[in-house]
Image: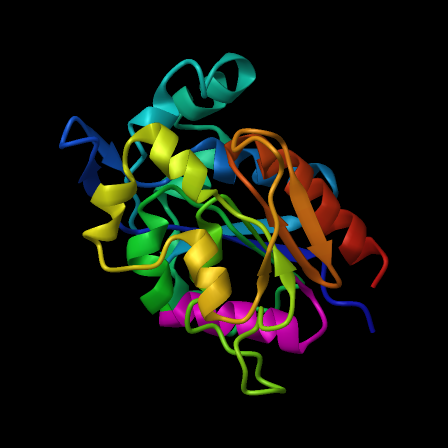
Amino acid sequence: MAPPRRALISITSASAPIHGGKDTTGLFVTEALHPYNVLTAAGFEVDLASETGKYTADTNSLDPSFLSGEDRKIWEDTNSEFRKKLDNMKPAKDLVNNDYGLFYASAGHASLIDYPHATSLHEIAAQVWDKGGVVSSVCHGPAIFDNLIDPKTGEPLIKGKKITGFTTEGEEQLGVKEELKTWGQPLVEELAQKLGATYSRAPGPWDDYHVVDGRLVTGQNPASATSTARAAVEVFDKL
């Protein structure tokens, strides 16, 4: 029997100063909004959840270079379905008994902080995987794979699989690599190596790029959020 056409988009609950305290990192808005649009258009019932039920918007993600046009209208309309779900989302522990067929980890640099320890989000993702559903992530979303175990094998869910995510080169270009190191969590490329996954990337750190490895679908950066979600839907529809 095919998994239910119901998806959970995970949201980081963490926030932290970045760029020497000039900005605050949290949820990179379009990394949740774009997959939300794709999934709802594809007929999915979509829930949003963070580990604590709280979120902070990444200040850089609100810049017009990232958030403009219809995206900005949706964001600024607190009565839009996306904003209502985001602003009123439940903590992940309240949703672990829900039956999802697709899990999508949105991100923002802050994901590196809380995703490795987000036990309720891990439980939901593991349930989706164990029941034959699709697990996906974008940008810094692979941080969710740290301590995410495949229930059938007892091994890291991404061990032996091919993934992508935000590049170390991109961190260097943004001038935040050394700041991120002070958080004590591995960067995406380091995490892939740590967990026995093969890391793949596009030639440029900002290119739209995603990887499909069976039921695992990962995207490289904010520009990849839509294509990653579309690929996840395509995989789901073939289950």
Name which residue lies at 58% across and 68% down: 158
Is residue 14 rendered magenta in the image? no
Q: Is residue 99 above or below residue 136?
A: below
Q: Quadrant of residue 190?
A: bottom left
Q: Where's residue 42, x and y in %?
A: 74, 42
Q: Nearer the viewer, residue 130 or 143?
A: 143
118 sits left or right of 181 in the view: right
Residue 145 visible from this viewpoint: no
SS assignment for the magenta stretch, majority:
helix
Residue positioned 40% across, 63% down in the render: 92
Q: Is residue 133 magenta?
A: yes
Left or right for 237, reference 118: right
Vertically, is 112 above or below 205?
Answer: below
Range shown magenta: 119-134
Q: Residue furthest right?
A: 238
Residue 87 picture location, percent across and down: 35, 41
Closest to the observer, 21 or 167: 167
Which image quadrant for residue 37? top right
The quarter of the image holding the N terminus is bottom right
Q: Is residue 238 left or right of residue 58?
A: right
Q: How is the image coloured?
A: rainbow
Identify whether 96 is placed above or below 31. Answer: below
Residue 111 rendering spot, x and y as whole percentages:
36, 51
Residue 148 coordinates in the image, percent (x, y): 47, 72
Residue 59 in sight in this render: yes
Furthest residue in direction left, as rendered? 21
Q: Residue at x 52, y 12 (%)?
A: 69
